[in-house]
Amino acid sequence: MTTPRFLVGSASDTGRVRSMNEDAFVVTEQVFAVADGMGGHLAGEVASAMAADNLRTLAGAVSTDDAVNAVISANLAILNLSRNDPAHRGMGTTLTGIAVVQVEGETRLAVLNVGDSRTYRLRAGRLDQVSIDHSYVQELVNAGHITEAEARVHPQRNIVTRALGIEPGIGIDVWTLPAVRGDRFLSCSDGLVDEVTDDVLLDALCDFAEPQAAAEELVRLANAAGGRDNTTVIVLDVVEGVDPSDVSDDDDRATLLHYITVRGSDLDPTFDDTRDNTLDVMVNLDDQDNDAEPDDDDTPPWETNPPRDLTAAVLSHGRDTTNGFPTAHPDETPNTLARRMANQARANTRLVIAGAAVALVAIILVVIAALTGGSSNDGPKPGDTVAITDFVDVTADSTPDTSPDSVNETIGDASDLPDGTTPAN
């Protein structure tokens, strides 16, 4: 069996708008991953760096279990620091990338994903998105409410529904793919995909043979398109591996996705922010027994679910099944904080629209009042024709009026006449 060999290129840039780079990445012999931090100065970059550091510890004969547990460990480390240090309160990070793992003696690629950073695979000129975006707009796309084109410009496209460091419970998507010779993988933060389309990604990945050159070109393209966010890119080439003719689409789909959920409760009194809970929540993908009794009192309030293979129905949900990659999992449980953020954002949008409508109506009423209330149409104005009979005072003692009952006379504009003169009759 051929031992896989890889070439990798990486690049990261602050962009043209942001003052700091909150992205982090890790490139070792075992792991190639990107983390996109959030939480602002001295927070987002810390969270992403912690995620990268936890994955950097993987070395040697790494299993899929090891890779998943490194992500769980990163989540707990970020969460504990966020809760215990006000300077880092609310920080979190997305994570996507590839770990080289051993599955039953075979070297495979475990694609890990939490959040809306992405991992793609280029094979034979075709670019497929392997990871699933954990974002509010992706849920709208899956539900058929908006198109993928509309999702690219949606005002709430940056709301994620999963991230590391937000709460103890976490959902991790894990794919195990064969290391096929000639495959090229792209892992990137959303600073790239928010600026350029998949067609542009495909062209760049096909035009540059060297992975480092391809990575640098993709960052350049993101900045040229606006560079409104940090951009981090890893391009991984499988130089030696399984012969492409030996792998079919069915082989890819057979062990495509294991969805791991570690559930937790912030309200459970046994949870201790100051205690290192990492070793207590390790996941074993081969362990199907969820009913085992806790070993001791140190077991934290987490329930670790076994992996669930996606059914054909799920694989076909929301996407053409010919590409072999799913878009959603029916048991997906987004973290509750991010869900509340999405709901609040929608409520704020409705409130802003309602307020704008009320303000517009008020402005229109004020303008109408100003235009109609500043002058009166009751009195004559220059150029008007009026009847002057009503202005003649006739009393019993006065000389009878021999003038006509009504005299229509045009009142002229006397402003230009000499002083003391009157308009001629």
Image (cartoon, rainbow, N blue to C red):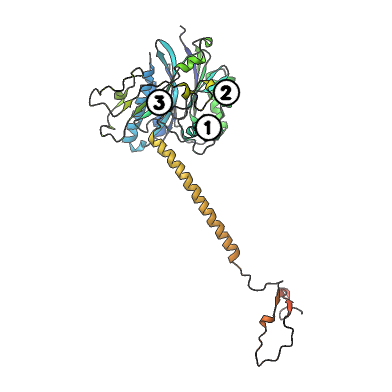
**Residue under pointer 2:** 202
Q: In this view, does 182 lie above or below 147?
A: above
Q: Nearer the viewer, residue 22 or 289?
A: 289
Q: Is mark 2 on a helix, strand or loop?
A: helix
Mark identifier at residue 172: 3
**Residue under pointer 1:** 194
- Residue 217, given in percent of the width and then of the height, sits at 56, 25
Q: In this view, does 275 lie to the left or right of 189?
A: left
Q: Residue at x 29, y 29 (%)?
A: 301
Instruction: Give me the C-alpha separation between circle 2 and circle 3.
Output: 27 Å
- Residue 405, given in percent of the width and then of the height, sits at 72, 83
Name the kind of residue labelled 1 in the image.
Answer: Asp
- Residue 84, given in percent of the width and then of the height, sits at 31, 35
Name the kind of residue labelled 3 in the image.
Answer: Ile
Q: What element carries label 1?
A: loop
Q: Is residue 356 left or right of residue 46?
A: right
Around disc 2, counting alpha carbons within 10 Å, would you say few (fewer than 14), some (14 to 19), or many (20 or more)?
some
Q: Which-is-in-front pick, marks 1 and 3?
A: 3
Residues at circles 2 and 3 in contact by the CB criterion of under 8 Å: no
Instruction: Give me the C-alpha separation between circle 1 and circle 2.
Output: 15 Å
* Residue found at the far top of this picture: 1
* Residue found at the far bottom of this picture: 397
Quarter holding the C terminus?
Answer: bottom right
